Image (tube, rainbow, N blue to C red):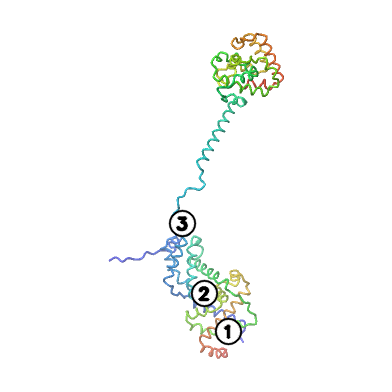
Amino acid sequence: MAVATKPTYSEQDIIEGCVKGDRKFQELLYHTYSSKMFSVCLRYANEYATAEDLLQEGFVKVFKNMEKFRGEGSFEGWIRRIFVNNSIEHFRKKANMYVVQETEALTYEYYDDNALSKLMKEDLLKLIQSLSSGYRTIFNLYVIEGYSHKEIAVMLGVTEGTSKSQLARARYLLQKKIVDLMPHMKYELPDQEASI
Amino acid sequence: MISDKNMEERNDAFDSAIREKMSGHEPVVPHALWTRISAELNESEEVATPAMPQIVPPASATPWWRVAAAAAVILTVGAASLLFILQPESENMTAAAKPAGKNAPAATVATQTPETPQVAVALTPAIEKKATTPVVPKTALPAISKSVADKAPEPKATQIVTPAAGDNDAALASAPAVSPASTLDMGNVPAFSLKRLSSPESLNDEITIIKSAPSKKKHHKHNGDEETTRVIILNKKFESQPDIRYQLPVRF
C-alpha cells in the first residue's frame, strides 16, 4: 500500500515560491519560522496580544520584501532582522531612555546564577516583558541578539553611553525581579556572598 | 562590596545564562494567525491590482469635426503650396483664374481693357489661332487687367486703345489674347513668344510684329498709326516700369 508523503521543498524552493506570491509556499515559510519569530516578538513586546500583532506585521513585511533577499547570509537571520527592526520601530516612540548615574549600583547584590537556572523560560519571559520598553529593547538587542553598544546607538538613535547605562539598569532590575520571584534564594545569597 | 572586575564577570555570566535560557524558546503560535496574515496579503494584492480594467473610451478623443477641419486645412494648404511651387511668381494667376459673373457688364470690360494691351501685344502672335474660341474671355480679362492696372501709374496711356463706348466687339475681340485659357494652358503658348518676352529688348521685336502683321480681326477698326502710337506709349511705359516689364513674361 502506497503511503502519500508530503513533498519536501528546499529553502530555495520556498524562497522562489514566496517571491512569486504563491500562497502555499508563504504558508510553508510561516509554519517554518513562526515559532522562532514569535519568541522574538514576545521578548520585545510587553504582552501576548502585542506580540501577535508584531508577528503578523513582521510576516507581511517578509512576504512583501522577499525579492530583496539577495542570498547574503542566512535566510533565518534575514527574517529575524526584519522582525527585530519591526519591533524596534513599534516601540521607538514609547521608549523612554534614562541616563543612569554612575553612582547607581549596576548589579543586584543578592542575585545568584542559581536563581536563573531554576527559573522557567516562560517566567523569565514575563520578567523581561515587565521591563519598560526602553530597557527591554536595549537588553534584548545587547544580551540576546548580540549587538554592540555602538550598533544599538545607531539603531535607536542614542549615544553609546545611554545604551550602556540603559543596559546596566535593565540588568539590575531583571536580577532583582528574579530574586524577588524566589524569595527563599534572597536569604541564601548573603551567606554565599559572606563565604566568598 | 563587589569589585568592578567581579561585577563585569557576574554580568557576563548573567547575560550568557539569559541567552542560553532563551535560545531554545519556541512558543506555540496561535493557529488563527496565518488566516489573518493571508487575509492581509489578499487585501494588499487587491488594492495593488484592480479586479477588471474598464474599457472606457478615452475622454481626450479627437471629435470628428476637428479631424474634418484639420483635413480641410491640410488640403487647402497643400493645394496652395502646389500652386505656388508650380508657378511661384504668378501672383496674378490666381486672380485671373477667379471665376467672375457670367453677366459681367461690358462697360467694365471696356474700361479695364486699356491695360490689357501690355499683355495682348506679347501674346498676339502666340495664341492668335486659338483666340477664335476663347474659354473664359470675359471673366479673366478684368482680373488680369486689374492686377496690371494696380501697378500702372499712367492711366492716360490706356485711353488710346479704349474702344468706343458700346463697342463690345472690339473689347471682346481683344479679350482672347489674354484669356486665362492661354495662361492656364501653357501647352498652347509657343516657346518663341515667351522667349521674346523674357528679355527687355524683345519689346522692339514685338512692336515690329504688330506693325508688320497686325491682326485684322483684332484691330480692324484702327489704322496703323493708332497701333504704332499705342505700342510706343507702351514701350515708354515699360521703360519707366522695368518691374512690370520683367514680370509680364513670367505670368505666362
Q: Position of residue A120 (x, y in %)?
A: 47, 81
Taking the spot 62% from the left edge, 87% from the top edge, the residue there is B1
Q: Nearer the viewer, residue A101 or A1?
A: A101
Chain letter for mark 3:
B
Q: Which residue is mark 3?
A: B50
- Distance, label 2 to label 1, CA atoms, is 24 Å
Kindly indicate the quadrant of the structure image that contains residue A193: bottom right
Q: Are marks 2 and 1 in contact (CB under 8 Å)?
A: no
* Image label count: 3
Task: Bin the neighbour count of mark 1 within 10 Å (Cα to Cα): few under 14, some 14-19, many 20 and up.
Answer: some
Chain letter for mark 2:
A
Q: Nearer the viewer, residue A122 or A51?
A: A51
Task: Bin the neighbour count of mark 3 within 10 Å (Cα to Cα): few under 14, some 14-19, many 20 and up.
Answer: few
For residue A118, side relative to residue B7 (left or right): left
Name above or below for residue A133 compared with residue B50: below
Q: Which residue is mark 2?
A: A45
Q: Nearer the viewer, residue B173 or B71?
A: B173
Q: Amino acid at mark 1?
A: Tyr
- Distance, label 3 to label 1, CA atoms, is 60 Å
Taking the spot 66% from the left edge, 8% from the top edge, the residue there is B224
Nearer the viewer's eye, disc 2 or disc 3?
Answer: 3
Taking the spot 29% from the left edge, 65% from the top edge, the residue there is A2
Taking the spot 60% from the left edge, 72% from the top edge, the residue there is A149
Q: Which mark is residue B34?
A: none
